[in-house]
Amino acid sequence: MSDFWSRFSRNRGAILGLVLLAAVIIVALIAPLIFPKGPWQMVQRPFLTPFATEGLPLGTDTLGRDVAAGLAYGARVSLLVGLVSTLVALAIGVPLGAVAGYYGGWVDEAAMRFTEFFQTIPNFALAIVLVAILEPTLTSITLAIAIVSWPPVARLVRAEVLSLSKREFVDAAQLAGLSNRRILLGQILPNAMSPIIVMASLMVATAILLESSLAFLGLGDPNIMSWGYMIGAARTVIRSAWWLSFFPGLAIVITVLALNLIGEGLNDAMNPHLNRKGRA
Amino acid sequence: MAIATTVLGRLIKAAITLLAIVVLNFLLIHAAPGDPAAVMAGEAGAADEIFIAQLRERFGLDQPLYVQLWNYVGNIIQFDLGYSYRQGAPVFDLIMERLPATLLLTLTAFGISLLFGVAMGVAASARVGRAGDSVITGIALLFYATPLYWAALMAVLVFSVWLGWLPGFGYETVGGGFTGLSRALDILKHLILPATTLGLFFMAVYTRMTRASMLEVAQMDFVKTARAKGLPDRVIRRRHILRNALLPVVTLAGLQAGQLVGGAVLTETVFAWPGIGRLMFESLQARDYNTLLGVFLISAAMVILFNIVTDLVYRLIDPRIGATR
C-alpha cells in the first residue's frame, strides 16, 4: 500500500487531479452553507457581468439567479450522478463479465453477444431515448448512463477472469474443494480489482460528461440545478452573455480532467509493468 | 470467396442486431408513461375519447402485444417508421431528407480527428519525455475532458462572434443565391466549426492511441534491425514504425467512429445544422416519439454499416487480419 502511494504521489498530474477533485467535492458539500438561498432564487437583476458586483463574483443569469450558486449546486448533481451511475454500471458489468469468463461455453457466448449488442448501439443516442421516454428524473438519468456504460466493464472483467482462472492458485483452490462461487468471489475477483478500479475512475468522468450533455439538451431533472442545464439555458444568449455558458463549462472541464488525471495515476501506480511499455 | 462469406456473415449479424433494436424500440414505446394512443392524439392536437378509441383501432393498439410487435416489425421492414404529426410527414422521409447533412458533418469530423490525431501522436512520440511531448499530451488530455457542445459554443463565441472569421450558424448562407463551386465553398465555410468541434474529442483519443502505439512498435526487433543497418531515424520512423503503428489505431478508430453520430446531436443543436441530430433534438422538444425512435434506429443502422465497411477495408489492405481470425 505504501508502495502504491509512493508511486501514485510521484505522478504530478495525479496529485493535481486529486487536489482539483477535492476542491470540487468540498464546494459540493458546503454549497448549502455558502448559498443558503439555493440556486433558483432571484438575487439581483439579470445579466450582471462577472467580477463587477460585490457578493456576486460570477454575475447573474437570464433570470437574475446567482451563477456561482448554480455552479456550487451543480457540482453536487454531477458528482452524485457520476458516482452512482458508475456503481450501477459496475453492478451490471462485473457479474456478467465474471460469469462469462469463468464458466465459458454457451454462457460466455450469450453474455458476449448481449454485450456486443449494447456496444453497437450509439451510446449517447440510446441514453437520449431512454431518458426521454422514461421522463427525465435523477433516477432515470442515472440508470440510462449506467445502461450505456457497462459493456466495457463486462469485457474487461471477462478478459481478467479468463486469464486469472488459468493460474495455479485457482487450481489449488479447486483441489482444496472450494465451490466455484467461492473461487470466483474469494480468489479471482479480488485479484482483478486494480484494472476495475482504474476503469471505474475514468467511467465517473465519462458519466459526468454524459449527464451534462443530456442536461444541455433539456433532459435534466427539472428540479435540480446542473452545469449542463446552465449551459443549455444560456445557449441562446451566448452573444450577449458569454459568462453564463463559459463558467459551467469550465467547471465540467476541471472536474472531468481531475478524474482522468487520477485514473491515469492509478493506472500507473497499480500496473507499473504496463506503464513502462507505454512510456518507453 | 473468404470475403464473400465474411460479408454475408456480417450482414446476417447486422440484420439480427437491427431487429433487436426494433424490438427494443417497441418495448420502449410501451414502457413510456401513458397510453400511446393518448400520446398520438396529443401530437395530433386533439384528445377526446372517441378520437383516441379510433386511433387505438386504426393502429391496432387494441390488439394483443405480440400482434402489435409483429405489425411494428413488418412496417419497419417496409421502411415505414411511422408518421410525425408535428412535422406533418412520414418519419422515414424526414430522416432521408436530413441524412446527407449529417453524413457530410460526421465524415468530415472523422477525417479531421484521424488526420490531426495521428499527426499529433506521431509528433509526441518523436519527442517522448520532452517538453513537446508534454504539451501535446496536455492538449489531448484537455480536449478529452471538454464537453463537445461547450467546445462548439466557445468556438462560435471566439471565431464567429468576436473574430467574425467563420459563420457559426446553419448549413449555408440563407438567400445567398450561390450555385456550383461558390455554393460548395459556402457550405465548406459553414462546415469548418461544427466538424472541428465534433472531432476534438476523438482527435484526443487518436492522439493518445497513436503515441502509445508508436512507442510500442519502436521497441520491436525489426526496428532494432533497421537501426543496426544504419538507416536514418526519419526513415525508420516513417517507413517502419508508423506503418505498423497505424493499423491498430485505424481499426479502433473505425469502430469508434459510430459514436460520432451520437455526438452529432449536440453539434447540430449548437450550430443549427440541418441533419438528423438536429431532428432528434426537435423531436425531443416536441415529444415526438415516432421521430425520436426513427432517428435512433437509423443512426444505429449507420453505425453498423460503417463498422462493416471499415472491417472490409482493413481486410483488403492487410490480408493478415482475415487470416488470424
Image: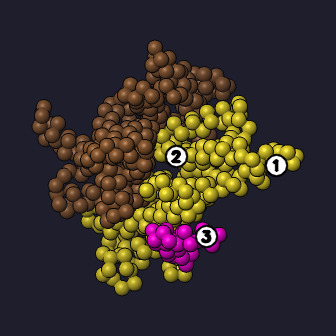
Rendered residue at 56%/55% (across/down): A199
Q: Is residue B150 above or below residue A241?
A: above
The dot on residue A3 is 3
Labels 2 & 3 near each other (Cβ < 8 A): no
In this picture, which residue range is highlighted in magenta? A1-30
> Mark 2 Cα within 10 Å, few/some/many (few <14, many 20+)?
many
Q: Which residue is identified by label 2?
A: A127
What hue does chain A carry in this figure? yellow
Same-chain status of marks 1 and 2: yes
Q: Which of the chains bears the disc numbered 1? A: A
Q: Position of residue B33 (x, y in %)?
A: 60, 44
Work out whether residue B277 or residue A196 is closer to the camera in this orientation and state it: A196
Gap in angstroms between the C-alphas marked 1 and 3: 28 Å
Q: Is residue B303 magenta?
A: no
Looking at the rendered structure, the kind of residue marked 2 is Ala
Q: Which of the chains bears the disc numbered 2? A: A
Q: Which chain is brown?
A: B
Q: Secondary structure at mark 3?
A: helix
Q: Earlier in the sequence, mark 2 or mark 3?
A: 3
Looking at the rendered structure, the kind of residue marked 3 is Asp
Q: Which residue is identified by label 1?
A: A173
Q: Secondary structure at mark 2?
A: helix
Quarter of the image where one finds residue A254: bottom left
Quarter of the image where one finds residue B160: bottom left
Q: Earlier in the sequence, mark 1 or mark 3?
A: 3
Please give left or right for residue B15 compared with residue B165 in the image.
right
Q: Earlier in the sequence, mark 1 or mark 2?
A: 2
Gap in angstroms between the C-alphas marked 1 and 2: 42 Å
Labels 1 & 2 near each other (Cβ < 8 A): no
